[in-house]
Image (cartoon, rainbow, N blue to C red):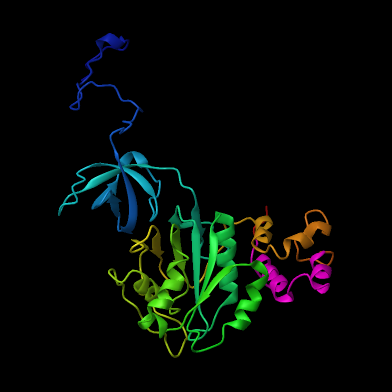
Amino acid sequence: MRRYGKHTDEDDVRVRPSRRGTRPRTHRRPKHEDAAEGFVVTVDRGRFTCLVEDRVITAMKARELGRKSVVVGDRVAVVGDLSGGRDTLARIVRIEDRSSTLRRTADDDDPFERVVVANADQLAIVTALADPEPRPRLIDRCLVAAYDAGLDPLLILTKADLAPAEPLLETYAPLGVRHVVTTAEEFGGDPAAVARVRELLVDRVTAFVGHSGVGKTTLVNALVPDRRRATGEVNVVTGRGRHTTVSALALPLPGAPGWVIDTPGVRSFGLHHVRPSRVIHAFPDLEPGTAECPRACSHDEPDCALDAWVAEGHAEPARLASLRRLLASRERTD
């Protein structure tokens, strides 16, 4: 049965009142000017552990942040229960501007960027000299990511008791990258060895990266002994380590200003997010040689001036080969 005639007026239409009231919708969001500043120290299944002053709290991301990701190292604004008591939960309502963002992709063809850590200013690239064998190509990729993100690289070579460090150090000597060489026995109880690494971390926010089995977490445990993390062994068949660190964790450097951020072991470090034209910036020993390159030179073609530059002894051939391997693995163009 028709309730209204054929020509109804809008005033004749009965509007059912809303159960939620008659307050108009608005896109304005609260500014949360009274929010406290927090520092994200770890992330676990949608829950964020934050340091607020001297209290450790658990928080969740507020709905108004949408799809914005919160990662370890972020400085955030939090509201709600900030007591840090058991079963309390606060809300992250704002992510402060990041001074740096270290990213990687699963491989060079994967367009999905994974933010490894935010607001770091130093990247410690940890690699073993043996057991497992060093992977210079992975080191190169980490260096590219560090330079692209504006981080200072630090090369930490472990297990020097199993193999000499000089051949690998010679490869990276032209870059002037700071480095430190350690042995497994030293980090078993030699305070002087720990101090050599520790002095390079003071007043810095340092993210540690490396593939599994290189001793990265063992090193972190020696630097921050009160927060020991599980370590694993290297598989004797594959020569690869087992992932024991499954989430990033920021730890304060004991007795000095600074943060150590332990990240999960990686087996690849994709650079899809880094434009090929910027890869050369990670090779400062080669960059001057590009001055005579043809316009839009890919640095992997017959007319590239880098061949003559290297032949004249200005840089190591291995460095040019490393650059071209990185470029060859990239299919995306500017």
Which residue is at the far left? 86
Residue 264 position, x and y percent, is 40, 68
Q: What quarter of the picture does the N terminus occupy? A: top left
Q: Give the range drawn in magenta.
A: 305-331
Q: How many marks?
A: 0
Which is nearer the eye, 236 or 227?
Answer: 227
Q: Is residue 329 magenta?
A: yes
Residue 144 position, x and y percent, is 60, 62
What secondary structure do most residues of the magenta stretch adopt? helix
Q: Which residue is drawn at 33% across and 63% down?
A: 255
Q: Residue at x 25, y 21 (%)?
A: 23
Q: Quadrant of residue 12?
A: top left
Q: Does the magenta stretch include residue 28?
A: no
In the rendered image, the vertical position of residue 272 relative to residue 190, given as above or below: above
In the rendered image, the vertical position of residue 148 relative to residue 91, given as above or below: below
Residue 8 in view in this figure: no
Instruction: Answer left or right for 21 relative to 320.
Output: left
Residue 233 in view in this figure: yes
Residue 54 position, x and y percent, is 25, 51
In the rendered image, the vertical position of residue 53 relative to residue 1, given as above or below: below
Which is nearer the eye, 194 or 334?
Answer: 194
Q: Residue at x 44, y 57 (%)?
A: 203
Q: Which residue is drawn at 49% across and 84% down?
A: 132
Which residue is at the far front? 192
Q: Quadrant of residue 13?
A: top left
Residue 271 position, x and y percent, is 57, 61
Q: Quadrant of residue 249?
A: bottom left
Instruction: Answer left or right for 13 relative to 267.
Output: left
